[in-house]
């Protein structure tokens, strides 16, 4: 039998592993490439988003990732033949100084020059504003073909954790947490917590549902009354609890990818060691109790069957 102290040591070692894996993920070329690609997707204005949506829906496209023709080429993807672009307004961005004089760029020195002030400015001392608009076209990823875009995996395959999931469902019931499975319909949304309600995406694998439910339960236990804590720290705590509990029961977790996307690192994760290990220990013990009850009920049913 494992002593409570041994369990705590095991959990803390797992969280240390998570912290190391998060740093490793962030340092990887794959991750850096992913971030570059994501930052190159346009952030469109509200007005443009409406335009895009109206145009796209009339073309029976549900847009997810939009870029111009040339930009797709730079990702080794090509717009398929016969595809029509979605019209947008592209702002023409110009640089200004603090007096809102429009600046000219010197291509040799890479500095910006103000004709009025007769002064040079470095990049950090300028303001970017739209000086006008031009019409442009973007294409959704579904209208293109070629090399797949890199993807950071958060979900896991596997259906083996059904007993753990059932034990967690019982834990929610006992603690008056309302649990619902719903079709969330939005890419990359696996679940969420709102007050005493937890909603989990019903379309994911069992192992992903289990990992998500642990994450949301951790939010419920730790952050329901703590709205001052920064979002990043809340996500570190919830995901580290999920990672530690999943690891204990042999369920795969991609928590390091999730935390890398939240810009967490070794130090920030380890700063939460005590609260994460305490919550993980409590959840592990509760799941184990739930599992024991389940097998006992199973035994009774079997014995009754023999009697009959
Ligand atoms: Zn000026
Ligand atoms: Zn979260």
Image (tube, rainbow, N blue to C red):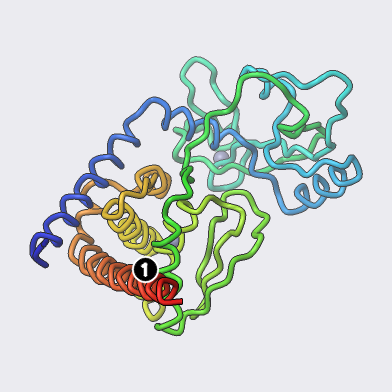
Q: Is residue 133 left or right of residue 55?
A: left
Left or right of 238: which side holds 192?
A: right
In this view, the residue farthest toward the top is 108
At horizontal 36% and vertical 57% (from top left) the residue drawn is 239
224 w.r.t. 109: above or below: below
Q: Measuring 40% from the left and 50% from the top, which residue is drawn there?
A: 262
- Callout 1: few (<14), some (14-19), or many (20+) C-alpha neighbours within 10 Å? many
Q: Position of residue 191 (x, y in %)?
A: 53, 61
Residue drawn at x 57%, y 25% is 105
**For residue 215, above or below residue 132:** below
Report the residue at 74% width, 34% height from top. Answer: 140
Relative to 165, is 288 on the left or the right? left
Is residue 202 rendered to the left or right of residue 70? left
Query: At numbered mark 1, what does the secondary structure look like: helix, strand or loop?
Result: helix
Q: Is residue 19 above or below residue 289?
A: above
* Residue 202 on image: x %, y %: 60, 59
Front-most of residues 152 and 134: 152
For residue 237, what is the image quadrant?
Answer: bottom left
> Is residue 239 among the parts visible in the rendering?
yes
Residue with the mark numbered 1: 218
Residue 11 is situated, as x and y percent measured from the top left of the image, at 19, 57
Between 281 and 63, the residue placed more toward the observer is 281
Residue at the far right: name it: 58
Question: Is ligand 2 less than 8 Å from the beta carbon at label 1?
Answer: no
- Does 40 sit above or below residue 78? below
Q: Position of residue 123 (x, y in %)?
A: 47, 34
On the rendered image, what quadrant is the N terminus found in?
A: bottom left
One can see residue 228 in this view: no
């Amino acid at each position: 039998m494992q002593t409570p102290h041994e369990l705590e040591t095991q959990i803390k070692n797992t969280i240390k592993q998570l912290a190391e894996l998060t740093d490793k993920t962030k340092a990887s070329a794959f991750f850096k490439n992913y971030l570059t690609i994501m930052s190159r997707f346009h952030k469109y204005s509200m007005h443009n988003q409406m335009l895009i949506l109206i145009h796209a829906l009339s073309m029976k496209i549900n847009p997810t990732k939009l870029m111009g023709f040339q930009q797709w080429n730079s990702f080794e993807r090509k717009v398929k033949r016969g595809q029509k672009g979605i019209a947008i307004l592209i702002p023409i961005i110009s640089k200004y100084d603090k007096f809102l004089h429009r600046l000219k760029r010197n291509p040799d020195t890479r500095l910006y020059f103000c004709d009025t002030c007769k002064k040079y400015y470095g990049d950090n001392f300028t303001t970017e504003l739209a000086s006008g608009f031009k019409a442009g076209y973007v294409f959704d990823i579904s209208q293109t073909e070629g090399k797949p875009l890199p993807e950071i995996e958060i979900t896991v395959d596997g259906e083996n954790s059904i007993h753990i999931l059932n034990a967690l469902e019982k834990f929610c019931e006992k603690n008056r947490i309302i649990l619902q499975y719903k079709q969330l319909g939005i890419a990359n949304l696996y679940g969420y917590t709102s007050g005493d309600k937890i909603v989990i995406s019903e379309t994911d694998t069992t192992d992903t549902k289990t990992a998500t439910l642990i994450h949301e339960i951790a939010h419920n236990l730790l952050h329901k009354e703590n709205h001052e804590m920064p979002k990043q720290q809340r996500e570190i705590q919830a995901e580290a609890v999920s990672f530690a509990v999943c690891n204990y029961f042999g369920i795969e977790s991609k928590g390091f990818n999730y935390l890398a996307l939240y810009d967490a690192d070794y130090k920030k994760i380890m700063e939460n060691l005590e609260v994460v290990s305490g919550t993980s220990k409590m959840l592990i013990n509760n799941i184990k109790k739930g599992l024991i009850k389940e097998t006992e009920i199973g035994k009774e049913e079997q014995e009754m069957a023999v009697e009959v």
